[in-house]
Amino acid sequence: MANLAEKKRGYPSKLMSSLRDLLSAQEILALRNIRLGYLQYFFAFPLAMIFINMQDFLLGDGIHVHGLAQTTITFISFVIGAILMFAFSNETNISVISKISAFITVAGFIPWLFLPDGYPSLVCAVVFMAGIGGCVSSSSFSFVFVLNNPERFFGSALMLLVIELVGLGIGFIPIHTIARKSFALILIAAISICVYFSRNQDFVRAGGKTVKKFDMSIWLVLFILFAYFTIRITGFYAPAFQHPSAAQLWDVLALILILLCIILQVVFKFSVWTMCNVFFLTAIMSHVMWYLKLFKLAFMFSELKEVGFYISFYLIGCVTNKFCDFRMHKRLILVCMAMIGVLYVGIDLLHTMMFTQSIAVVAASVLFIIFLLLSPAYSQYLFFADWSKEFRLTYMSCLTKDSTQAGTAEEKQLLRLEDSHLSPREKQVVLLLLQGLTLRQVAPELGLTVSTVSTYSKAIYKKLGINSRAELFMLFGHQRGDGSSTTIRKE
């Protein structure tokens, strides 16, 4: 009957209901859930992406070959290295691929560091940029299959903040060649070390996946990525997105506001859906401010749209971890690369035929409207799907044949608790706490002392990244059992 009633509801009613639910959705992202034993994976992908985004600054102008700038040649080398290493990567050789990439990077970078601009320097740059391409490829696998949810979120945020901070520094201070190469040395050393220490055994969870096609949630996340790059590329030509003269203080304010967005996300546990709205609204506000002739405010809002950058990476990492194996991950990356390539070419062609500000305004507005109209789909397939509570856990569970064939709703609920990485005894404590028992009442149920139950409770909160019973109910409130400890499923 409930399903029949749902079908009879009109689309406007579904849309309003979805918007209300999505606004109330929450996620738990705590810094303490970043694992010290996995820091090499936490830093590898963000640092490699930082280097690529700052290539023009780090490598300098150099020389031209047949009309091609040095950065164009080195970027082509990066793409070739990334494609080759990506094509040959799998669960069993990822550690070897990572080490080869690190070796190529170091072998090309060390001589480049000491050579003046010229053809020998360019050759070395081509070599180590191919190695960086391999590092990006191998670290993309660890970003998806090894990191947990908070690590993906904070790693993506780190990537954005460093890129913005360095860009800000370049605007304030003229950078000497020695300082530029020294910064490149720090980045290359860190990337190579992180990638080199990749371990095959850390990718075992990527094995056992049985999904053979993209889940609907993947397409929804790809739309956010598509929207970000569309707004970013149209912004290359839009006056509202251009840096006004003498606006360094507005650069600083924009960076502070981006940092504030990240802090508010963590402190108030907003859903990432809320941050997606921030991305769209700030992009639109940049155009509004430009039309009002508030050009510095327009630029500030255009910088704030970069929250879409780290939100896209975070969501793709989480959903890919849930629904993809290595092969599906490769297909997803190919789809993303093709999509971005088409965007660059298509927007360049439009730029020659239309007023650039009009393209950017229409694109941002239409994409935001589509995003809002898709709210029922985002609610059903992503933020309130059967597995969506895993966004509020430290880890996404591994989608295997056994878990996809679980027969009853109760079994699926128990699987979600099992996937929380708690010990069997800790799961017993959780189920009793969810029945409303106090720690003193839980103790005799399990034959333990109150202090022991208290210790278990603290360990549970730490593993789940929460601080209160209310947050525990938010995670597992649907798994209260029947009031008896015998209902707890033994492992």
Image (cartoon, grey):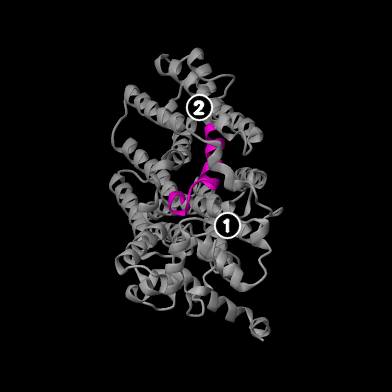
Instruction: Tell which tag, 1 or 2, sits nearer the viewer.
Output: 2
Position of the C terminus, as image quadrant, is bottom right
Percent x, y of residue 433: 41, 73
- Please tell me whether residue 264 belongs to the stretch shown in magenta: no
Percent x, y of residue 466: 37, 63
- Please tell me whether residue 147 belongs to the stretch shown in magenta: yes
Where are the magenta residues, as a range? 135-152
Answer with mark 1 or mark 2, whichever residue precedes in sequence.
2
- Seen in the picture, residue 317 relative to 469 is either above or below; the reply is above
- Seen in the picture, residue 478 relative to 290 is either above or below; the reply is below
Kindly state the secondary structure of the residue where label 1 is placed: helix
| Residue ID at (49%, 52%) | 314
From mark 1 to mark 2, how far is it between C-alphas?
31 Å
Quadrant for residue 158, please give it.
Answer: top left
| Residue ID at (48%, 51%) | 148
Percent x, y of residue 72: 55, 28
Residue 221: assigned label? 1
| Residue ID at (57%, 62%) | 366
Kindly state the secondary structure of the residue where label 2 is placed: helix
Q: What residue type is labelled 2?
A: Ala
Q: Name the residue under label 2.
A: 102
Q: What residue type is labelled 1?
A: Val
Q: In this view, does 241 lie to the left or right of 454?
A: right
Q: In this view, does 50 lie to the left or right of 126?
A: left
**Badges 1 and 2: C-beta atoms under 8 Å apart?**
no
- Seen in the picture, residue 30 relative to 488 is either above or below; the reply is above
- Residue 428 visible: yes
70 and 430: which one is in front? 430
Percent x, y of residue 29: 40, 58
